[in-house]
Image (spheres, helix red, strand yellow):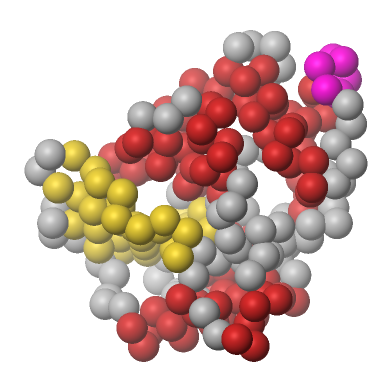
Amino acid sequence: MGEITLVRHGQANSAATDEAGYDKLSDLGHTQAAWLGSWIKAHDGPFDTVFSGSLRRQRETIAGMGFDDVTVDERLNEIAYYDLSDEMTAKGLADPRLGPDDFAVHFPATLSAWRDGKIDGAETYDDFSGRVLDVINEAAQPGKRILCVTSGGIIARAVAHILHLDIPQMAQIALPILNTSVHRIHVTPHGPILGAFNSAPHLDHADRLAARTHY
């Protein structure tokens, strides 16, 4: 049986108002990545291949974890959510998003509008879904352990595919995903099985409670 380990990037610049401003780790994000890398080295087995998206926050996370032999794959890049949200506002489909706390309302509404063609984005919703499923299918190699550092929207879409969830349920999956959380997909002859969701053993310390961040 193979295994795909998906890791969400560390805390990024949650005070940002656009894609470029968001795309860098905070000081805490760098620390979270280092803690996870130390935990993996002490408690996990070796990986056959390590992948990362090309976004700065993803590459900073995998570097902070201590991996240097990394294959960069843009299919692991996050949804351009700020751009989609701005388009929702421009077309009068939603009020302006005031901050991260609005995510619970804006995220499912934005995904639904995107899927239904009410907003365009830089890619279609079908193209987004297709690239996520493509990279997961390629990583699903029998007997191999694959590590992918990516983002919450990618993880939520992969889990939604395995569990046959629609957008409202996918949004509920996305909301609690922690920075530097670990998600495991077992590769079996009968298809992928979700083995672990949103685990963060490197943060399971009393003095790291404040380091458990969602954004």
Tell me the residue at 71%/17% (across/down).
119
Q: Is residue 143 left or right of residue 38?
A: left
Q: In this rendering, is residue 162 above or below 71?
A: above
Q: Which residues are magenta?
A: 89-94
- Find residue 209 and report its horizontal and vertical position in percent: 65, 78
**Residue furthest toward the left?**
189
Q: Nearer the viewer, residue 114 or 135?
A: 114
Is-magenta flag for residue 113? no
Q: Nearer the viewer, residue 204 or 181?
A: 204
Tell me the residue at 70%/11% (across/down).
118
Q: In this rendering, is residue 175 above or below 27?
A: above
**Residue furthest toward the front?**
206
- Find residue 90 and report its horizontal and vertical position in percent: 88, 20
Q: Is residue 127 visible?
A: no
Q: Would you identify the image quadrant in which residue 5 lies? A: bottom left
**Residue furthest toward the top?**
117
Q: In this rendering, is residue 86 above or below 118?
A: below
The main secondary structure of the magenta stretch is loop
Q: Is residue 185 left or right of residue 125?
A: left
The mark total stands at: 0
Is-magenta flag for residue 93? yes
Tell me the residue at 85%/46% (across/down).
99
- Find residue 64 and report its horizontal and vertical position in percent: 56, 77
Tell me the residue at 28%/40% (across/down).
137
Q: Is residue 215 left or right of residue 90?
A: left
- Find residue 184 and report its horizontal and vertical position in percent: 34, 57
